Image: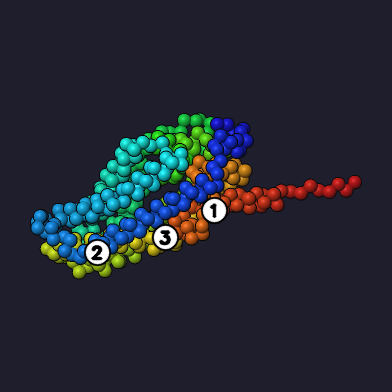
Amino acid sequence: MSSEQPAAADALSIPRPHPDEVQEYHRVKRILHISELVMGALYWIMWVALGPGHVRWIDQSVDSPWLGLFAAGLVMLGGLVLVTLPLGYYGEYLIEKRFGLSNQTPRSWFVFQLKSWLVGAILLGIVLGGLYGLLWYAGEAWSVWVWAGLILLTVVLAKIFPLLILPLFYAAKPLDSPSLTERLRRLAEGAGLTITGIFDLQLSKDTRKANAMLTGLGSTRRVYLSDTLLGAFNEDQIGVVFAHELGHHIHGHIWKGIGLSAVVMSVMVALIHWRLDPYAGRPEEWVGAVGALPQVFLITALWPLLVAPLTNAIMRRFERQCDSDALRLTKDPAAYRSAFELLARMNLADPNPPRWEEILFYDHPPIAKRIAMADGYERVMASEQPRPVPDQA
């Protein structure tokens, strides 16, 4: 890759998908996504409708409240996994294969799911153990401690994600391009930042899509550029993507995201308090507390969906700030435009999704709006160019 290439030269090697293909891909994905949400909600409503009687088998089988709690959680969430597995396989594997976006085999897809379930089971154990331990033994302020514990867990996960969780799914190695690394470090220095590492993330084993992200906190903060992106983008385009990721650090978006999560979780925890507080300080009545678990799961499933229009709007604002920084730091709207056009081709992105879909599901601005930002920036640059002084001779 050479920065001397024309900004959009690499885009020529990526076929431009037909608009009908893009629309069909998103139509199917939209239907599947909504179906999974509805199925999940109905699943928990079914458990709630069964009433407290659904835990009688646990009461008859175990004497320990902890064994009863984890057995109930495993059965309920395991059932959800089984119910949604066919949709997941169809949408995440078959559809991605059909549209030429996946490099997975059925086996590698299933291994990926197993890893996801393992991580999820560990986190479930931590959250359920903390929730009910505090409910039974932390006194009247138990829900305040639950809220604080969830925030702490969010911070810890953000810290360890690039060290422990991401490597379970994708290998990564330091970027092996001295000239590109130096160029990106200069961009970071120009923004007054020091990045602890720039990594080549090996996504190509699973997908042909391109991606980039900033993860970690403090000493674990790293920028990841997927190998699919590095193989298709030229250095000007990579610089734009990297500058966008720098914007997240410039504006402290990771910490702001954690703060946003804290606000959202405060209401969610208040709803959980309302449902579980009758069992506070009463571990001997664990059967009733565990019997309320489906309502807890229903709250945690529905509340984020209800506030999604607000949280997505905030996240889209964060992304627009980063797009603005990418233009400001690189001063290269042509590379910015070609980078997002190429990204749209590789990911089969819908440049203009329906407005309702953007509000409900998009935490990034649609591609068309991002490219329009480059057009606006280019017009501003042109207006600021000094005009030649007329010849007075």
Horizontal and vertical percent position of residue 73: 22, 54
Q: Quadrant of residue 171?
A: top left
**Residue 377 shows in the view:** no
| Amino acid beneath label 2 | Val
**Residue 211 shows in the view:** yes
Q: Quadrant of residue 18?
A: top right
The mark that comes first in sequence, 3 or 1, is 3
| Amino acid beneath label 3 | Ala
Whether residue 74 sits left or right of residue 264 in the image: it is: left
> What residue is shown at x 58% (from left), y 42% (from top)?
338
Cα–Cα span, label 2 and label 1: 39 Å
Horizontal and vertical percent position of residue 330: 58, 43
| Number of the label disc, if any, that sits on residue 48 | 2
The mark that comes first in sequence, 3 or 2, is 2
Whether residue 316 sits left or right of residue 219 in the image: it is: right
Front residue of this view, candidates 306 and 357? 357
Residue for badge 3: 308
- Secondary structure, mark 2, is helix
Check whether the beta carbons of the residues at disc 3 and disc 1 lie within 8 A of each other: no
Q: Nearer the viewer, mark 3 or mark 2?
A: 2
Residue for badge 1: 352
Whether residue 242 sits left or right of residue 215 in the image: it is: right
Q: Nearer the viewer, mark 3 or mark 1?
A: 1
